[in-house]
Amino acid sequence: YHYQEQIQFCRAARGSLSETLNHTYTAFDCEYITQDRVKEIENKAEVLGKLLNGYIGFLKKQKQNQQN
């Protein structure tokens, strides 16, 4: 188990979350989904983004503690 690898994985997940939001906006522009659905996805993405950022912060602290 390597902290840096896990951090990189979470950063990639954060990028995928951003891509998902971009695809959501495209789907809305093409009238595949409603504005209510966009808001629902945005709200969930915000929660997930905060979770990922918090976990990345935790991993960075653990990595630093291990090095000391």
Image (cartoon, rainbow, N blue to C red):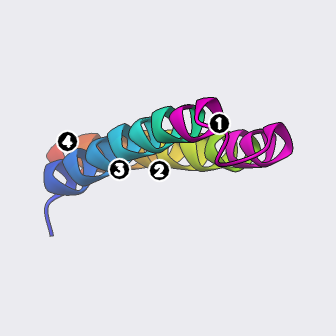
- Between 25 and 3, the one lying in front of the other is 25
For marks 4 and 2, the one nearer the N-term is 2
**Residue pointed to by mark 3:** 13
Q: Quadrant location of residue 36?
A: top right
Q: Are marks 4 and 3 in contact (CB under 8 Å)?
A: no
For marks 4 and 1, the one nearer the N-term is 1
Give coordinates of residue 42: x percent, y percent: 69, 39
Q: Residue at x 24, y 57 (%)?
A: 6
Q: CA distance from mark 4 to mark 3?
A: 28 Å
Q: Residues within 10 Å of mark 4 (few under 14, many from 20)?
A: few
Q: Residue at x 46, y 44 (%)?
A: 20
For marks 4 and 3, the one nearer the N-term is 3
Q: Indicate the secondary structure of the residue bearing disc 3.
A: helix
Q: Indicate the secondary structure of the residue bearing disc 4.
A: loop
- Between 9 and 15, the one lying in front of the other is 15
**Residue pointed to by mark 2:** 55
Magenta span: predominant SS is helix
Count of marks placed on residues: 4
Q: Residue 28, which numbered label?
A: 1
